[in-house]
Each structure stands twice: as structure tokens, then as C-alpha cells.
Image (spheres, grey):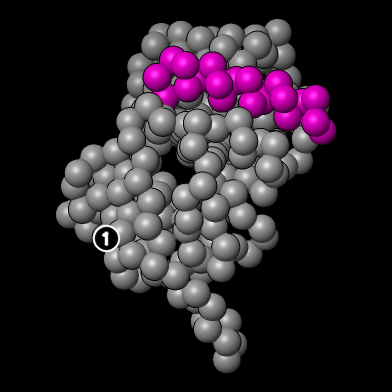
Amino acid sequence: MILLKDIYKIYTIGDETVKALDGACLSVEDGEFVSIIGPSGSGKSTLMNIIGCLDTADSGEYLLDDIPIEDYSEHELAQIRNKKIGFVFQSFNLIPKLTAEENVELPLIYQGVKKQERKQRVEEALERVQLTRRKKHFPTELSGGQQQRVAIARAIATRPSLILADEPTGNLDSRTSDDIMEIFHELHRSGNTIVLITHDDEVAEQAERRVNIRDGVVTAV
């Protein structure tokens, strides 16, 4: 599914040049559960942004489903982000003025999914994260764990094959983190490919395979 070869990403901050990714290489097969672990500033979020087609590398090769990413048009990349990839972020990224079910429904509206099917998918997604009873609540009326459940429901409502999670337990206590990780395990058992970025060893160890990143260099464990 994913193959990165010699990926470089360089940022210039004032007079300083920072190699966010320094010849990074990574492969992820369909159906894998891979964790990418590294300290703050190691390049892991940059790596996720490139995998998720939110950013592009300065050099190197990225094959997605055996096709070089540069061969995709902007429209095709937008479709990949919208349909193939589900994103889950540390800060939840929910819209405060929308209820839980409205947040989950939003990407389906962008996809042009018809109203009746949207309703069904939203109900299914919220049920999978055990949040049906809170669907009419706004983000400010939900705990951090519940907000992350909404974010996961939003990610899976589009029925993506790949889920990218960037520090999904970073703002949660240990018990809530365990609950969220169990949802990812269930999604993996259901056939989703999962790439999870974290700085937490205990979270990283729960994946099938663990990859380290430090100073923009990726090494397998």
C-alpha cells in the first residue's frame, strides 16, 4: 500500500536549515498495524503528513498503491484524502458549533453521499465507538475521550482503507487511552490498515510492528 524511498523534507527557519526527514524509508502493507515512535521534533508528524498526502517531499519517491504520488492529479489526491484515508489527530479537530453526529457527517457531505446513506453511516460509525447516546451533544459537552471517539467515528464514516492517527492518545489519561487503543485494535481486526504516530512506548508496543524515527531518520525495530 505505502512505500517511501529516500524521502527528504527540509525547512528553513531564519538562517537555520532543518532536515525534518533525512532519507526516510518505510513500507506498510495492506492490513498492517504499524506504530511510528519518536520524540518531539523527530519528524514523525511530517512523515504522517506526507503519507496522508497533506504535504509533499522535497525529494525521494512515494508509491501509494504502486503508483508514484507525483502521477496523481490534485483532484485525485483530494479524492484519496477524502475516501481512502481517515485522519485522527491529537487535538480532535472537531467543529465546536456542530454536534457529534454533525461532525461525523461533514466529510460525507463533502463526498456527495446522499442524505439517507449519510444518516446510516453516521449511526454505524457512532455505534462502533459506543457514542450513540451522545450524538446530539456538542464537543464542549463531551470529555476528551468522547471527543476522540467522535473524531475516530468521523474518520471511519467514509469507510477508508487506511487510518492515520497522530498522537491519538496524547491528550488522554491512561484509562481513556486504553479504551481508544481498543477501538483501533477493533478497526484493525476489521481489515483497516493503521499507521499510528506516538511518543509513548506503551502505545507503540501495541502495534504489530514498531518503527522508530529520530532526527528525520526512520529505523525498524
Range covered by the magenta-colored residues: 173-192
Q: Quadrant of residue 79?
A: top left
- Is 17 situated left or right of 201 in this image? left
Which image quarter holds the N terminus?
top left
Q: Nearer the viewer, residue 170 or 148?
A: 170
How many numbered discs?
A: 1
In this rendering, the answer to whether 67 lies above or below 21 is above
Q: Residue furthest bottom?
A: 15
Q: Nearer the viewer, residue 86 or 82?
A: 86
Q: Residue at x 54, y 78 (%)?
A: 18
Amino acid on which disc 1 is placed: Glu
- Is 79 situated left or right of 159 in this image? left
Q: Quadrant of residue 88?
A: top right
Residue 55 placement (x, y as % from top left) = 41, 58
Residue 192 placement (x, y as % from top left) = 42, 24
Residue 166 placement (x, y as % from top left) = 58, 44
Q: Residue at x 61, y 39 (%)?
A: 204
Q: Residue at x 35, y 71 (%)?
A: 58
Residue 110 visible in the shown view? no
At numbered mark 1, what does the secondary structure look like: helix, strand or loop? strand
- Is 13 situated left or right of 34 in this image? right
Is 115 magenta? The answer is no
For label 1, the residue is 61
Q: Quadrant of residue 81?
A: top left
Residue 61 visible in the shown view? yes
Is 184 magenta? The answer is yes
Q: Residue at x 62, y 36 (%)?
A: 205
Residue 80 placement (x, y as % from top left) = 31, 40
Q: Residues within 10 Å of mark 1 (few under 14, many from 20)?
A: some
Helix, strand or loop: magenta stretch: helix
